[in-house]
Image (spheres, rainbow, N blue to C red):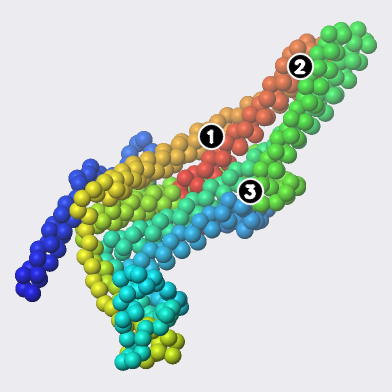
Amino acid sequence: MNNTFKKIVAICMVIAFSGCKTPSVIQRNENKEVPSSFGSNGVVEDTINSGKIKWKDYFKDPKLVALIEMALANNQELNITMQEIEISRNEIRARKGEYLPFLGLKGSAGVDKVSRFTNIGAMETTTEIKPGKEMPEPLQDYVFGAYATWELDIWNKLHNAKKAAVSRYLSSVEGKNFMTTNLIAEIADSYYELMALDNQLAIVEQNSSIQENAFEIVKLQKESARANELAVKRFEAQLLNTQSLQYAIRQKITETENKINLLVGRFPQSVDRSTAAFVELMPNDIHTGIPAQLLENRPDVKKAELELAAAKLDVKSAKARFYPSLGISAGVGYRAFNPSYVFKPESLLYSLAGDLTAPLINRNAIKAAYYNANAKQLQAVYNYERTILNAYIEVANQVAKIDNMQKNFVLKSKQVEALNQSVNISNDLFISTRADYMEVLMTQRDALESKFDLIDSKMAQMNAMVNIYRALGGGWN
């Protein structure tokens, strides 16, 4: 007995030793370092961060707020992501169940007729259940009992898998937050674009009226021999070109409205929006805070961090597969060939067993899983670092854009003012024959283009205001 026990212990030690050998892999720690500021001057800004402002306080237009609320409730992509979160939550339940004991009930009934000319058949014919009572033929079989299995998670393989599932669930939540941030930014951006198109359409209609007056004047001048047919046709061509712009703008308005309708989850319809003068809108004051705050504010950065944590746990779980696993199985119940005997004490049966197993030869599948887990961990490291870098660059770009577009808008405003005065002057000079028609046409064209440019400049300002809020991680809270 002692020799047998020693052999069992020796075999277990060999198995444990062989299972503890794991292949070496390349590992890399993530780099979380970011510059001290978003500017090139290296000056550290204050810690006030506009990204922490709630979106209802950041966007004050009530019609825009109503659209965002509708999108948060009805957007299909966001609702799809919510179901992905539910899937991740169920994965946690599944992983948790793997390291808990499995307990079940079992009941069965059957009948078995074996051949007389077999070893079992020969034994049954000579076996008596009780003195003077032969084994029944065919032999019935009735079983009722409970069974349990349990893998002892001695290397935390199953617990690490469950923790990885938790990290992925939290990552999916951050993914939903990131989608919410982008959705709010996209609606706000499209809303301001719609307002810009409305104002461009009003400018075109206003300029069409001015050019119609100029066209009537040049026709009268032709009749009085103060202008020729060429001037009339050039004025007419410019008027037709300006009028045709209306339909291109109306098409853009329709497409932008339907883009918003898609985001809010409804069929095409008119979008209710503000009728305020677009160029008079004032962007919000922006506080960028410090770059380190991106690690806690930006949902995509937190998502990448949680995916990295899950990948590290996957490596530990895959590594534990090289180690011996200990399992316990047990059962208790009743079994008899006759239903009337099933619950008698003589029909009681039970079992208890433990097993220790470890991979010894041909561990290629386990090695491949381990190598893959480590490669995915490295991918997660690079993705995390890339996400941080991308977040920083996005904020830096919008900081520069806000400053440059503000200066651009000031100059464009002065240009529009000067060209508006030029239009009046050129019209007066043309009427008094002190300027030719080409000067009038060129001045009117330049004035129209400058007004469009002014709208575009204001649109760039509002776009920067929206995008820096998104880049700072605002919108999901």
- Does 404 appear above or below 331? above
Q: Nearer the viewer, residue 426 or 470?
A: 470
Pointer 3: what residue?
Answer: 263
The mark nearer the N terminus, 2 or 3, is 3
Give the CA distance from mark 1 to mark 3: 28 Å
Three-letter amino acid code at disc 2? Val
Give the CA distance from mark 2 to mark 3: 45 Å
Is any part of residue 68 visible from this angle?
no
Image check: 175 left or right of 278?
A: left
Image check: 393 left or right of 7?
A: right
In what element is the residue under mark 2?
A: helix
Find residue 385 and report its horizontal and vertical position in percent: 34, 43
Residue plotted at (24% across, 57% down): 320
Pointer 2: what residue?
Answer: 440
Q: Nearer the viewer, residue 452 or 165?
A: 165
Pointer 1: what residue?
Answer: 405
The mark nearer the N terminus, 2 or 1, is 1
Q: Nearer the viewer, residue 416 or 433?
A: 416
Is any part of residue 214 visible from this angle?
yes
Image check: 62 left or right of 202?
A: left
